[in-house]
């Protein structure tokens, strides 16, 4: 009798340890796209890789979007200030790692001029939200997230995660 109860208890414990593949929620791309396009006040903190023919590295980033205006802070992994780029009422300013202030109307040209990095500043808010922007795209087989063809290559959204009730792409 004890052996039967012990065997049954072991089976129940083992059954509780099995895992199943999580089902991906079906997302209506047109509805989700419209919802993401309306999202214009948000913040992102993370890490990015910078790869150019001359250098490779990584940086911590903090992006704050407030309507058409934004603020991007880049720092090294150890916390050293790399640059702060901001747009306020159409004017772009960049504070470099020496604390010098630079002004421009073109953020991408300014970043390239001072760092040699081609950072697609204009497209980043859309890409961060998982929107294709002006890129040609095709829907994945489940009609959820697009695969994009851009001037700098292809971008495929592999999976999504949820951040405060917004389905976000993760590559």
Image: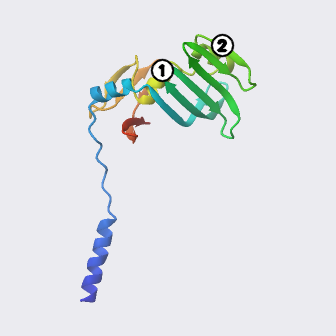
SS label for mark 1: loop
Mark 1 crowdedness (10 Å alpha carbons): few <14, some 14-19, many ≥20: some
Q: What residue is shown at x 30% (from left), y 82% (from top)?
A: 6
The label nearer to you, 2 versus 1, is: 2
How far across and how far down the image is residue 131, in percent?
Answer: 39, 25
Question: Do residues under tags 2 and 1 come within 8 Å of each other at their CB atoms?
Answer: no
How far across and how far down the image is residue 45, in percent?
Answer: 54, 36
Q: Quadrant of residue 29?
A: top left
In this rendering, position of residue 140 left or right of residue 129: left
Q: What residue is shown at x 38% (from left), y 39% (from top)?
A: 159
Mark 2 crowdedness (10 Å alpha carbons): few <14, some 14-19, many ≥20: some
Rounded to the nearest whole Å, what is the CA distance between mark 2 and mark 1? 20 Å
Depth check: 77 or 162 in front?
162
**Mark with earlier residue (2, 1):** 2
Which numbered tag is attached to residue 123?
Answer: 1
Quarter the C terminus occupies = top left
Depth check: 118 or 75 in front?
75
How far across and how far down the image is residue 18, in percent?
Answer: 32, 62
In this rendering, position of residue 96 left or right of residue 18: right
Q: Quadrant of residue 118?
A: top right
- Looking at the picture, does residue 131 appear above or below residue 103? below
- Count of numbered labels shown in the rendering: 2
How far across and how far down the image is residue 77, in percent?
Answer: 65, 39
Quarter the N terminus occupies = bottom left
Residue picked out by circle 2: 103
SS label for mark 2: strand
């Amino acid at each position: 009798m004890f052996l039967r109860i012990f065997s049954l208890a072991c089976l129940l414990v083992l059954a509780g340890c099995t895992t199943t593949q999580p089902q991906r929620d079906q997302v209506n791309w047109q509805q989700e796209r419209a919802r993401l396009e309306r999202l214009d006040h948000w913040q992102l903190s993370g890490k990015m890789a910078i790869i150019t023919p001359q250098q490779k590295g990584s940086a911590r980033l903090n992006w704050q979007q407030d309507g058409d205006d934004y603020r991007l802070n880049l720092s090294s992994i150890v916390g050293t200030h790399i640059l702060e780029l901001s747009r306020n009422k159409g004017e772009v300013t960049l504070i470099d790692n020496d604390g010098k202030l630079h002004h421009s109307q073109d953020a991408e040209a300014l970043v390239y001029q001072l760092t040699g990095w081609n950072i697609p500043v204009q497209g980043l808010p859309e890409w961060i939200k998982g929107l294709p922007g002006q890129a040609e795209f095709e829907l994945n087989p489940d009609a959820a997230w697009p695969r994009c063809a851009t001037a700098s290559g292809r971008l495929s959204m592999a999976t999504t995660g949820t951040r405060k009730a917004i389905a976000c792409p993760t590559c």
